[in-house]
Image: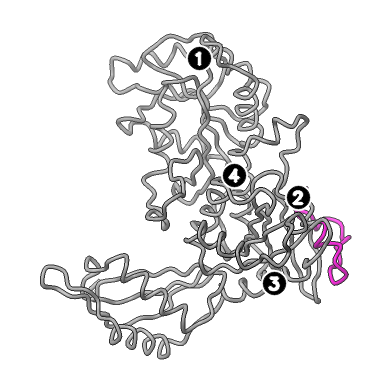
Amino acid sequence: MKLPTVALVGRPNVGKSTIFNRLVGKKISIIEDTPGVTRDRIYGDVNYKDFKFHLIDTGGIDVSKETFNEEIKIQTQIAIDESDVIVFIVDGKSELNANDYEIRDMLKKSGKKIIVAVNKIDNKNREDNIYNFYELGFENVIGISGEHNLGISKLLDLVTEDFQTVNKDSDDDNIIKFAIIGRPNVGKSSLTNALLNEEKAIVSNIPGTTRDAVDTPFKYDGQDFVAIDTAGIRKSGKIYENIEKYSVLRSMKAIERCNVCVLVINAEEGIIEHDKHIASYALEAGKPMVIVVNKWDTVKDKNDISSFTKLVRAEFKFLSYVPLVFLSALTKKRIHTLMPEIIKVYENSKKEIKTSILNDVIRDAVLLNEPPSYKGKRLKIYFVNQSGKMPPKFTFNVNSKGLIHFSYERYLENKIRENFDFEGTPIVLQFKNKNE
């Protein structure tokens, strides 16, 4: 099931970022200590009751300072187009101005559900201010305070009232869905087309099998797959397609629905920060991954795979376990190497380890390298079991989870990876006190 998307729009200084942070909550990234991965993002996921949705924050629209240029207009329009619900945030401490009316006119044309959130209503004296904003002509107007967490639950009730609850069991387990993700112009569509034209791949012509314009069902070696191509926001004008931060939204939607992420990078241009940004979303979603170095035909020394591998490993240190595939979607050279890797990392994400064997491995790891002591106390691991899959999750029963140091946690993960083939899939370690 595709998750709905909600956009926050409004002029500058109305409190969009505060409300965004309030709705998303403080999210501790599993790659928080990884240098080079931006954590100040304009996208996030919101969990509320039995609902989950994507949230997008947009830049403030300001016509008075002549900053309402073509790019800002396009960015806002993309957010509107991509969203199911739009929260129009206005300042409850001030009057409506030209910026508010400009935004209103854009939203009126959208046909989407609009909620006017009158922010900064943090005391009873300001509650009457809410009525001023009915002038905008929208049915849903609600007073909130992002700073003081007032009215946020009512806002979320209004946002989610038409959403479906999340049902994780609705997808067909027999079909492997892989999303081809990456920034614009790295060759995602070309790669999809090259894969589907591979002689082993048979594109399905069964009516109704394509749920989305970018979903393509096909068979490979008798197995069912769906390729999810995230390329291209389908609007006229190159500037619309080249706003890189909005390619993240496309990727996030695909990541949510897929079993495997195929991150495409451009061998011709090398690795940029945006590549890491998109990769980090796949990692946080717990998806197995394959990194594709595309346009390998443009590299002069085709035997230089070793040095490029070192570069990728240095730039993507947080994905050291992910396999690399070098190919050219244009010439189809080495295209046959990709599907086996997708299948392998998917199978690894479903792998289950016997408890007795797992405990033997952890016991040997502790004997080889004892946990460091902290204030005279030392971590003791009593028992380990695998408590989940896709991605594999391991629960450690310990004397005190407060004694876990991130370096020792990484050591334990490395030992698990050394003994079991989890190539391509993240693994999650969680620690539980014995008496919990």
Q: Secondary structure at mark 3?
A: loop
Left or right of residue 47, residue 240 in this image: right
Q: Gap between marks 1 and 3, in whole Å?
A: 50 Å
Give the residue number, with chain letter if any, for mark 2.
214
Q: Secondary structure at mark 4?
A: helix
Using the image as rendered, state which of residue 16 and residue 65 is in the foreground: 65
Magenta residues, as a range? 193-215
State the mark number for residue 22. none
Of tags 1 and 3, the one toward the viewer is 3
Amino acid marked by disc 1: Tyr
State the mark number for residue 134. 1
Give the mark nearest the N terminus, 4 or 2: 2
Using the image as rendered, state which of residue 377 and residue 311 is in the foreground: 311
Badge 3 density bin: few <14, some 14–19, many ≥20, Cα 10 Å: few
Give the mark nearest the N terminus, 1 or 3: 1
Give the mark nearest the N terminus, 4 or 1: 1
State the mark number for residue 248. 4
Q: Gap between marks 2 and 3, in whole Å?
A: 20 Å
Q: Secondary structure at mark 1?
A: helix
Of tags 2 and 1, the one toward the viewer is 2
Q: Please identify the residue farthest to the left as the structure is shown.
A: 376
Amino acid marked by disc 4: Val
Give the residue number, with chain letter if any, for mark 3.
174
Left or right of residue 237, residue 204 in this image: right
Q: Are marks 2 and 3 in contact (CB under 8 Å)?
A: no
Q: Secondary structure at mark 2?
A: loop
